[in-house]
Image (cartoon, helix red, strand yellow):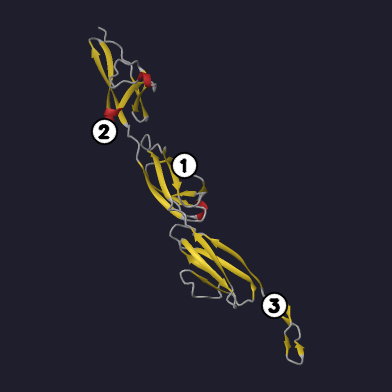
């Protein structure tokens, strides 16, 4: 405001000219902060901009609140609580508090379905992703940016082998998981037709040789049918009609293999 100073002595009075007392505008703060993008990245930042007062702004951040600098952006910050003091050259100040957070670690789990039959390439992998920042993008066996697909969590039509699934979150944080698709069962076999006679009447049967005899305890057989109701434990098929036939071999996991063979026609012996 405006002030006057009046001095009075015994015999006179003197009044000063007007004296103007001014004050600066109040300090005003605009600020922004960015949380840590990826777990362990320590890339958080705080920006504080002071206006008002008399200029000559300086800033300090905990734990070094006695070290002021004209730089108003604090970067490469780890998660945690921070205090920032912003002041002008008169020492007028504002105290600001912030808490920076970081996302949790990207955690990937998988559910694997093996091949059914050897070489059928019908294995699959489904993944679930936690942590980081959604949405997630994934890529199979490639870390090239253009190969990522957002929200793809299922991978199908996979042959047996080892695969790497790369995962990237909304901030570009990356992780991966290695999965193994087990090979399907090997139901390859050879069918040999055997011809014999009972008296003067020809008869026949088949001899079966499995390529992988380890599957023998888990398979069933049917002649000219893949219907589960026609399956039996042994491939003891005899006296089959002449012509084309097939033997169906069905494994407990659902794999079915068919093998074609032909029964030749023989007439009974006559004298």
Q: Earlier in the sequence, mark 3 or mark 1?
A: 3
Q: Earlier in the sequence, mark 2 or mark 3?
A: 3
Q: Earlier in the sequence, mark 1 or mark 2?
A: 1
Q: In the rendered image, which quarter is residue 199 located in?
A: top left
Q: Tell me what residue is drawn at x 38 percent, y 37 percent.
A: 115
Q: Percent position (x, y) of residue 236? A: 27, 20
Task: Determine which of the numbered discs, if any, sits on residue 22 in the image.
Answer: 3
The residue furthest bottom is 11
Q: Percent position (x, y) of residue 267? A: 31, 12
Q: Pointer 2: what residue? A: 214
Kind of element beneath mark 1: strand
Task: Determine which of the numbered discs, if any, sits on residue 216 in the image.
Answer: none
* Crowd class of label 2 (few under 14; some 14 to 19; many from 20; radius 10 Å): few
The residue furthest left is 199
Task: Determine which of the numbered discs, if any, sits on residue 154 in the image.
Answer: 1
Q: Is residue 257 above or below residue 126?
A: above
* Crowd class of label 1 (few under 14; some 14 to 19; many from 20; radius 10 Å): few
């Amino acid at each position: 405001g405006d002030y006057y100073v009046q001095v009075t002595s015994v015999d006179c009075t003197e009044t000063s000219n007007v004296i103007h007392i001014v004050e600066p505008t109040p300090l005003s703060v605009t600020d922004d902060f960015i949380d840590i993008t990826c777990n362990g990245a320590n890339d958080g930042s705080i920006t504080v901009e002071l206006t008002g007062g008399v200029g000559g702004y300086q800033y300090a951040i905990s734990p070094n609140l006695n070290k002021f600098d004209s730089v108003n952006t604090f970067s490469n910050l780890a998660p945690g609580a921070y205090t920032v003091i912003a002041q002008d050259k008169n020492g007028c100040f504002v105290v600001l508090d912030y808490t920076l957070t970081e996302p949790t670690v990207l955690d990937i789990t998988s559910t694997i379905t093996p091949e059914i039959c050897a070489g059928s390439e019908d294995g699959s992998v489904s993944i679930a992703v936690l942590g980081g920042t959604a949405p997630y993008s994934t890529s199979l066996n490639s870390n090239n940016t253009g190969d990522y697909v957002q929200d793809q969590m299922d991978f199908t039509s996979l042959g047996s082998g080892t695969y790497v699934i790369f995962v990237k979150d909304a901030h570009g944080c990356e992780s991966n998981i290695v999965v193994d698709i087990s090979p399907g069962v090997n139901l390859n076999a050879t069918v040999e037709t055997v011809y014999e006679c009972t008296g003067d009447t020809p008869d026949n049967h088949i001899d079966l040789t499995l390529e992988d005899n380890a599957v023998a305890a888990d398979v069933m057989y049917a002649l000219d049918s893949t219907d589960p109701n026609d399956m039996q434990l042994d491939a003891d098929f005899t006296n089959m009609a002449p012509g084309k036939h097939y033997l169906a071999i069905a494994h407990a996991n659902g794999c079915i293999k068919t093998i074609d063979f032909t029964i030749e026609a023989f007439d009974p012996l006559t004298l």
